[in-house]
Amino acid sequence: MESASPSKGLSLPTKILLGLVLGATVGVTLNVLYAPPLGQPATGTYASVAAFADGVVKPLGDLFLSLLFMVVVPVVFSSLFLGVAGLGSVGKLGSLGGRTLLWFLVTTTAAVLLGLLLVNWFEPGRAVTAEVAAQIKAQYAGDAQKRIGQSQQATGWVQMLVDIVPRNVVAAAADNGKVLGLIFFALVLGAAAIRAPREKTKPLCDLCEALYDLCVRVLAWVMQLAPYGVACLIFHATAKLGLDVMKLVGLYFVTAMGGLIVYQMIGITLLAKVFAGIAPGRFYRGCRTLVVTAFSTSSSNATLPTTIRTATDEFGVPKEIAGFVMPLGATMNMNGTALFEGVSVLFLAQVYGVDLSLGQQALVVGMAVLTAIGAAGVPGGSIPLLAIVLTQVGVPAEFLALILGVDRLVDMTRTVPNVTSDLVCSLWLARREGVALKA
Ligand code: ASP
């Protein structure tokens, strides 16, 4: 998937990158030239641009996303079942599972702490006056209400944990973006397969292997469309980006994006070097397609098959380890999301004028980690949960409106460390098992 034969010209990652650059350039140019000032209705050329972006380009981008999402449920089930069944012993499942969860918790917490450090340092909320806040809120109030509505459907923390065990696994799999129930079922079934006689489980293992293999083939076809899909997604995101809002909440934007970039470039890169022995150049060469896919789709779930392929094909992680870590990670391990949540909660608290004590900030860390685990790996999956955290620290959820105008770009960026952290976790575990990685 990564490389094309020389006779075909450009390699796929290069083509995807070109799609990204082209889509962004056209989108930003049209936005800069024609978008009306904040609060004014779209008229003339920009109205046509917006109609074209919404009516033609977005459906095409969504089609590409749906093609990726289409294989998520079968890939999660088959890779996790095969991964667990292939471990050979329940003890090994326990130790691998324990280390995986430890990785998720430690890296997610480190990411929130970095976010909090930056936001305390730069204090981006102090730069937003009450008038500016009111102006942005008026523009994005409708969108904020929609997300708050979604958050009200979300259940409390205890229920969130209870819901991990599904009453009906088919319904859990069908619940768009929330695959935790399916993950739990696949884990338990895989553990049962370890204990059952081989001849009894072989038909299901063969079936899952065939299903997984076919999904990978389908994915390879879908990825051929990635340069076009990515161009559409980024064009829509940039043409409709609130550039005015970006200026108004500029310091927030810089803090969130800066934190995410620093976490990715320094944090994840160091983790890859220290825990997996992979040098930075080699690491990023191996995950070019992964990074671009995560960035352009804004979705850990849609990127999941690519994350597994990158681990196995590019770095030589055994199938059972990648198949075990990645589905869990796509749902539960979101370093970038946690960092973003920390920055956003403190920023909005600053704008609202509440000073969060150290104790309250510690609460924010805990809640950001929990919500990052609970958030669905889909575009904007963490926003409804962010509304809950805001309410818990005494900031009205309507303040979400302040960040929605720039969230698409932040979402794209936070999805990258979300998936690369999963990748490094699998590299670490494989190395611990004595596997010689393709370093
Ligand atoms: N888009 C993120 C992901 O899929 C989730 C989020 O932070 O909204 O990883």
Image: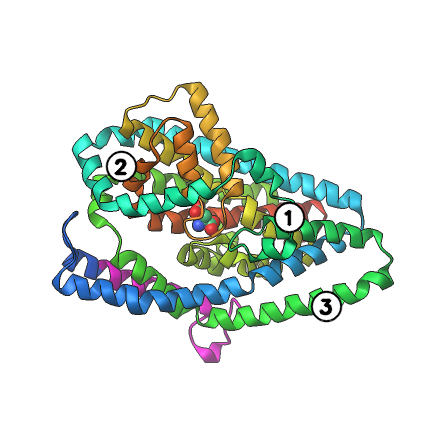
Q: Nearer the viewer, mark 1 or mark 3?
A: 1
Q: Percent from the top left, x then y, of residue 408?
A: 34, 51
Bounds of the magenta span?
Answer: 1-28
Q: State the CA–CA distance, disc 1 to disc 2.
A: 42 Å
Q: State the CA–CA distance, disc 1 to disc 3.
A: 23 Å
Q: Quadrant of the C terminus?
A: bottom right
Residue flagged by tag 2: what amino acid is it? Leu
Residue that carries the numbered disc 1 in the rendered image = 166
Give the class, few, some or many, for how many residues have Cα within 10 Å of label 1's Cα (few <14, many ≥20).
Answer: some
Which residue is at 87% across, 57% downward? 197
Q: Mark number for residue 364?
A: none
Residue that carries the numbered disc 3 in the rendered image = 207
Residue that carries the numbered disc 2 in the rendered image = 251
Q: Residue furthest left?
A: 44
Residue 106 appears anywhere in the view: yes
Which residue is at 29% across, 64% downward? 54
Residue flagged by tag 1: what amino acid is it? Pro
Marks 3 & 2, CB-CB < 8 Å contact: no
